[in-house]
Amino acid sequence: MSPVKVQKIVCIGAGYVGGPTCAVIAQKCPDIVVTIVDLNEGRINAWNDEEYRLPIYEPGLVDVVRSCRGKNLFFSTDVDKGIQEADLIFVSVNTPTKKSGVGAGFAADLNYVELATRRIAAVATSNKIVVEKSTVPCRTAESMRTILEANAKPNCRFDILSNPEFLAEGTAISDLHKPDRVLIGSLQSAEGLDACQALSSVYAHWVPRERILTVGLWSSELSKLAANAMLAQRISSINALSAICEATGANIDEVANAVGYDSRIGPKFLKASVGFGGSCFQKDILNLVYLSESLHLPEIATYWRQVVEMNEHQKSRFAKRVVDTLFNTITNKRITVLGFAFKADTGDTRESAAITLIRDFMKEKANISLYDPQVEEAQIWQDLAEASPNLSLENIKKQVKICSSSLEACKDAEAVVIATEWKEFKEIDWETVYQGMNKPAFVFDGRLLVDEDKLTKIGFKVITIGRGSL
């Protein structure tokens, strides 16, 4: 046998991973036809929007889609046609944490993965390379292979690969253009290695061969969870130190800088904040916790669980600091929250610290003014309703006001809370903000974003995470 020459790729799932990844593959591989399919017609329509109002905000993504859509990049709701025509199929569907049943709150919900796998088996009439792109528990490929082989048509073979993504939202396009590494896992059989070589050849259009790592199938699956767990661990570690800094008068920026000079540690992911969010970190660590418990490794599970618990503690600790500083009550006070996305340069709100902060402020009966430059209003209301299931949306809207600018959100506020590190928040006209606020005017910097000395000279009382109160 020899490796298949990939001419047509289909990606099942048009979300944060599948959309940008396959758009870049189309851009870098003009000889390959790439089709992204999804049953969500509204999402596909957005990808095909004439004005390029895409369903995902990611810097540089519009330019990539514009360069190849309609040439060798297509978006469609015809999942079956895509499966039938493809040589290689990416499965890039959602794998949220289970909300009920066995493993609820920890295990990944693999329902969409199974549905996609069964659809492939039912529709495919020729050999296919099936690639796990979703983040999945270790040995999920074994379940997929069992389903495919049990339902395959005669003389139809499926080879399964693991190809986890290592994208950071906000820099996904540059990450795809110049990846640290591309990881491909396969069975170590002749067929598995041929399939691995076929996918490697796709990435080799633009990724240096030495950055394409080929490993065993199970190692690839576990590597994704391990990478995210260790990155999250660094954030929780520096956030734990930020609490000590606040209590002792040390400066977390100075501590992180000093620690980062150690070549064994390095400076990345040592920036203290109100907490990490996003679609991956918490979900993947909880997945690792569940895997450890399933393997009868309780001490390992406890270790990784603490990373998530520290992250939740950082959010609640920050919210409490706001209340304590505002004379132990924020009842009927106006609190401005700047930022709702979990990080800058994305519209993604999953596990955003802002959701937790606003929920806690609402419990204290505060009035909240909120502004984010990218997150849609409908998404904000949906997230806040899910965070406070005992409150009707009507009652939530009595306490929360969504504003169209930073200046509007800050007017008549007692305090401004910076929850997302959007660049525009650094460039706000803070003189005007100060004039329009109630006095004393407080700024709580949860992202180490603003110039504390500058704001203090204007008249603000500035409380920065990781620094003691003056």
Image (cartoon, rainbow, N blue to C red):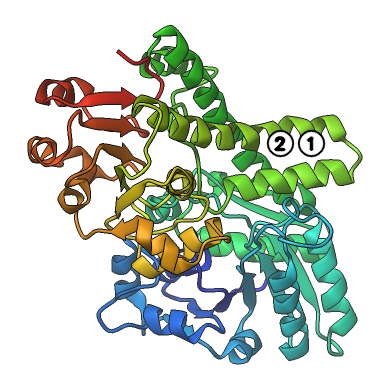
Query: What secondary structure is found at the residue carrying circle 1?
Result: helix
- Name the residue rendered at 71%, 50% in the picture: 220
- Name the residue rendered at 74%, 50% in the picture: 106
Q: Residues within 10 Å of mark 1 (few under 14, many from 20)?
A: many
Q: Amino acid at mark 2?
A: Arg
Q: Are marks 2 and 1 in contact (CB under 8 Å)?
A: yes
Quarter-wise, where is residue 110 in the image?
bottom right
The image shows residue 38, relative to residue 287, as above or below, that is: below
Q: Quadrant of the C terminus?
A: top left
Viewed as shown, does residue 443 lie left or right of 315?
left
Q: Residues within 10 Å of mark 2 (few under 14, many from 20)?
A: some
The location of residue 383, given as percent across then percent down, is: 48, 61
- Name the residue rendered at 20%, 28% in the picture: 440
Viewed as shown, does residue 438 lie left or right of 205?
left
- Would you say residue 183 is visible in this rendering? yes
C-alpha distance separating marks 2 and 1: 6 Å
Query: What secondary structure is found at the residue carrying circle 2?
Result: helix
- Name the residue rendered at 68%, 31% in the picture: 306
280 or 34: nearer the eye?
280
14 or 31: nearer the eye?
14
Viewed as shown, does residue 467 lie left or right of 89?
left
Query: Which residue is tagged 2?
Result: 305
Q: Quadrant of the N terminus?
A: bottom right
The location of residue 406, given as percent across then percent down, is: 20, 50
- Would you say residue 59 is visible in this rendering? no
The location of residue 22, given as percent across then percent down, is: 49, 69
Quarter-wise, where is residue 177 in the image?
bottom left
Viewed as shown, does residue 31 lie left or right of 100?
left
Query: Which residue is tagged 1?
Result: 301
142 or 374: nearer the eye?
374
Mark number displayed over residue 312 = none
Q: Amino acid at mark 1?
A: Ala
